Amino acid sequence: MESKLIKGLNEQYNFEVSSGYIYYSMANYVKDKGMDGFAHFFNKQAEEEFAHAEKLRQFLFEIDVRPELEAIEKPEVEFGTFTETFKTAYEHEQEVTRRINDLYELSVEEKDHRVTSLLQWYVDEQVEEEDNFRGIIERLERINESWAGLYIYDAELGRR
């Protein structure tokens, strides 16, 4: 019987894939509004999420567990203002952090040091992700949906 931790890793694998879909949906939303730089940013986020999923998938195989794909829920397609879009993304990253922290705690409880070692990378990654989104939101709040400021920031995020 699989441990709760291994089941959690497989769930996180699927959640990371789902996260990529969410970021692609956000990319589509902002691109439709003419913000190619913002779309580029979210496309890169999606690619990162798929890379995070792949890291989990490979790890599961390394410990002799076959990952299982689950159905992916259709993501939202409307996100409000640009600031609201990035706030939604930030909230999503906070959920990722919560899930990773829960898995980390479970790995410590189960004394599975292989998983603890893997999850430390994800813990560190989430610190960076949340910090990036907080910085973006702060700038967007200062811009206050001003088109001049948005276009300048769009060009900056397009260089990511």
Image (cartoon, rainbow, N blue to C red):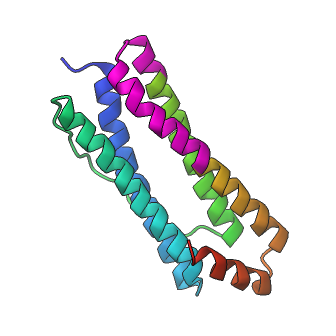
At horizontal 48% and vertical 62% (from top left) the residue drawn is: 45
Look at the image and say whether residue 110 sits in the magenta stretch: yes
**In this view, 129 is above or below 102:** below
Main SS, magenta region, reads helix
Quadrant that contains the C terminus: bottom right
Q: Which residues are magenta?
A: 105-128
- Measured as percent of width and height from the top left, residue 28 is found at 47, 76
**In this view, 156 is above or below 98:** below
Q: Nearer the viewer, residue 57 or 76?
A: 57
At horizontal 35% and vertical 56% (from top left) the residue drawn is: 50
Quadrant that contains the N terminus: top left
- Measured as percent of width and height from the top left, residue 113 is found at 36, 19
Is 84 situated left or right of 95 in this image?
right
At horizontal 48% and vertical 20% (from top left) the residue drawn is: 105
Count of number-bearing discs: 0
Residue 81 visible? The answer is no
Is 12 situated left or right of 160 in this image?
left
Is 141 situated left or right of 159 in this image?
right
Residue 65 visible? The answer is yes
**In this view, 154 is above or below 111:** below
- Measured as percent of width and height from the top left, residue 148 is found at 78, 87
Look at the image and say whether residue 57 sits in the magenta stretch: no
**In this view, 30 is above or below 48:** below
Q: Nearer the viewer, residue 84 or 105?
A: 105
Is 148 situated left or right of 93 in this image?
right
Q: Quadrant of residue 46?
A: bottom left
At horizontal 57% and vertical 77% (from top left) the residue drawn is: 159
Q: Quadrant of residue 114?
A: top left
Q: Nearer the viewer, residue 120 or 148?
A: 120
Q: Quadrant of residue 141?
A: bottom right
